[in-house]
Image (cartoon, helix red, strand yellow):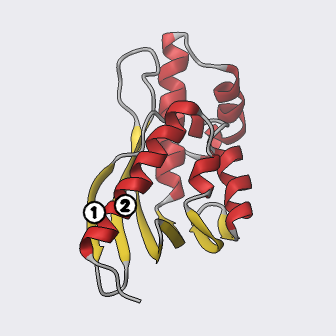
């Protein structure tokens, strides 16, 4: 099936708006609802998720724990529309909240979305180097610790994963 550039861009704008609302509310169910029932979601650190409910379980857990719930937004730095395939390929930024000292911390990933029509996506792949995210989260924790603002969940994360990265 082929979709117009306008439909793909509108669907991607809907995707981005949903992510903004989920980030604002802390409720990530609407994120899962953007996918077909049989979606395949490839996440390089967490594996392949099959089906909307698997995505829902993963995203609601991941985005309500450290470091996910300390990320303030997920803007697309750029995107490309592939009309022939019905894909959107984009770079998503993942900035963290201010750790208390004004420093900036974030990491980006490449997301590939396969459009299924009617505003739904049948596949998402998030490609990135997990070590970049671990290093960024550790740097955020150390900055928050130095600023005296390190929350308990981040402290526990740092104790568990901090030694894995420099």
Please state which of residues 106 and 79 is positioned toward the viewer in this rendering: 79
Q: State the image coordinates of residue 104 (x, y, percent, origin top left).
A: 35, 30
Q: Which quadrant is home to the N terminus?
A: bottom left
- At label 1, counting other C-alpha atoms closer than 10 Å, the crowd grade (few under 14, some 14-19, many 20 or more) is some
- The residue identified by callout 1 is 79
Kindly indicate whether the residue at mark 1 contacts the one at mark 2 (C-beta within 8 angstroms): yes
Q: Of the residues under marks 2 and 1, which one precedes in the sequence?
A: 2
Name above or below for residue 23 compared with residue 38: above
Image-based side of 27 in relation to 17, left or right: right
Residue at 56% across / 32% down in the picture? Answer: 25
Please state which of residues 46 and 141 is positioned toward the viewer in this rendering: 46
Q: Quadrant of residue 46?
A: bottom right
Q: Say which element carries label 2.
A: helix
Residue at 47% across / 46% down in the picture? Answer: 19
Q: State the image coordinates of residue 148 (x, y, percent, origin top left).
A: 55, 10
Q: Residue furthest top?
A: 148
Q: State the image coordinates of residue 85 (x, y, percent, origin top left).
A: 36, 85
Q: Which mark is residue 12?
A: 2
Image-based side of 1 in relation to 146, left or right: left
């Amino acid at each position: 099936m082929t979709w117009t550039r306008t439909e793909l861009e509108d669907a991607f704008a809907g995707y981005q708006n949903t992510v903004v609302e989920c980030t604002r509310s802390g409720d990530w169910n609407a994120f899962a609802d953007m996918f077909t029932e049989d979606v395949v979601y490839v996440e390089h650190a967490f594996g392949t998720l099959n089906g909307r409910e698997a995505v829902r379980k993963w995203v609601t857990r991941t985005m309500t724990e450290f470091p996910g719930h300390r990320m303030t937004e997920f803007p697309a730095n750029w995107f490309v529309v592939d009309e022939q395939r019905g894909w959107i390929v984009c770079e998503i930024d993942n900035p963290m909240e201010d750790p208390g000292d004004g420093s900036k911390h974030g990491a980006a990933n490449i997301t590939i979305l396969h459009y299924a029509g009617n505003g739904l996506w049948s596949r998402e792949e998030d490609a990135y180097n997990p070590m970049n995210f671990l290093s960024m989260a550790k740097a955020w924790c150390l900055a928050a610790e130095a600023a005296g603002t390190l929350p308990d969940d981040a402290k526990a994360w740092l104790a568990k994963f901090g030694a894995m990265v420099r």
